[in-house]
Image (cartoon, grey):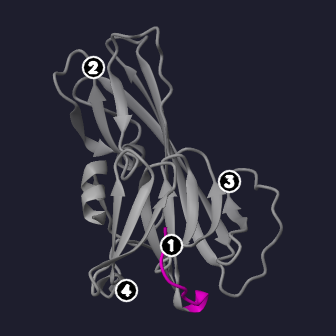
Amino acid sequence: EHTGLVPEQDDPLILVSTLSGSFVGIGQRTGEIRWQQYNEPVVKVPLDITERSAPMFLPDPKDGSLYLYGAEFEVLKKLPFTIPQLVANSPCRSSDGILYTGRKIDTWFSIDPVTGEREQLLGFQEAESTCPLDIQDAIFVGRTEYNIIMVDSKQKERKWNITFYDYSAAKNDESIDEYDLVHFTTSSTGRVVTLDRRLAMVLWELDLDSPVIGIYSISKDGLVTVPFTSVAEGTLDNLLQ
């Protein structure tokens, strides 16, 4: 659902990243989906069902934080490092005897803001077969793939590997101070609700079919992280009443 007709030049893009790997261009004020790209899921954690007693490493897709879950722990245990930090310090060993090794692969894309077509500009992996883009106002997007492999030095049959994808975006930007929208998402579905901060009214609601893990505005220097609040489904329903 979205309200009102706003010319595209008065309705700048926000880019929304979802857990399933979608990257969606949406009009800030109308909620109009202009285009959608489909990428690899943001996190991949292969599960070994033969090792049911082994703890599981669970990544937070929003920032790469790591949690440990297993029979040895009564609650989900948050580890004191993120996947990007592990990769930066690899190879390393934790105090409980887990050995870590990791790598990161960076790729640059240019994206046509109108059509969503993209071209790989720079990367160590073989480029996708896409048409070259000749666009004055192309959006330049950096995406990083983090891989970590872990083994328990005390029980060498216990091995894990995790893949995590992240977009390169500025965390603090003057443009965010002037940003007059507030975004709410649900933590388990793809619903997004956007309000106008000044008018105190709901502008639009969308369902992107997968939980939102990142929202970005576009500046002359690239992507800028836009804050959003994840709430329970019922809380979002109350907000819309």
Label 2 or label 3, whichever comes before in sequence order: 2
Element carrying mark 2: loop
**Residue at the disc numbered 4:** 175
Circles 1, 3 touching at the beta carbon (< 8 Å): no
What distance separates the C-alpha of mark 2 from that of mark 3? 36 Å
**Residue at the disc numbered 2:** 70
What percent of the width, then of the height, locates residue 237? 30, 56
The residue at the point 57 percent across, 60 percent down is 23
Q: Main secondary structure of the magenta part?
A: loop
What distance separates the C-alpha of mark 3 from that of mark 4? 33 Å
Q: Which mark is residue 120?
A: none
> Please, what is the three-letter code of the amino acid marked with disc 1?
Gly
> Please, what is the three-letter code of the amino acid marked with disc 4?
Ser
> Please, what is the three-letter code of the amino acid marked with disc 2?
Gly
2 relative to 36, above or below: below
Of labels 2 and 3, the one closer to you: 2
Q: Which residues are magenta?
A: 1-9
Count of residue discs: 4
What distance separates the C-alpha of mark 1 from that of mark 3? 35 Å
What distance separates the C-alpha of mark 1 from that of mark 4? 20 Å
Residue 232 visible to an observer of this rendering: no
**Residue at the disc numbered 1:** 31
> Please, what is the three-letter code of the amino acid marked with disc 3?
Phe
Density class for disc 2 (Cα within 10 Å; few <14, some 14-19, many ≥20) is: some
36 relative to 75, above or below: below
Q: Which mark is residue 124?
A: 3
Q: Is residue 109 magenta?
A: no
Query: Splitting the image into 4 quarters, where does residue 185 fall?
Result: bottom left
166 lies left or right of 139: left
Element carrying mark 1: loop
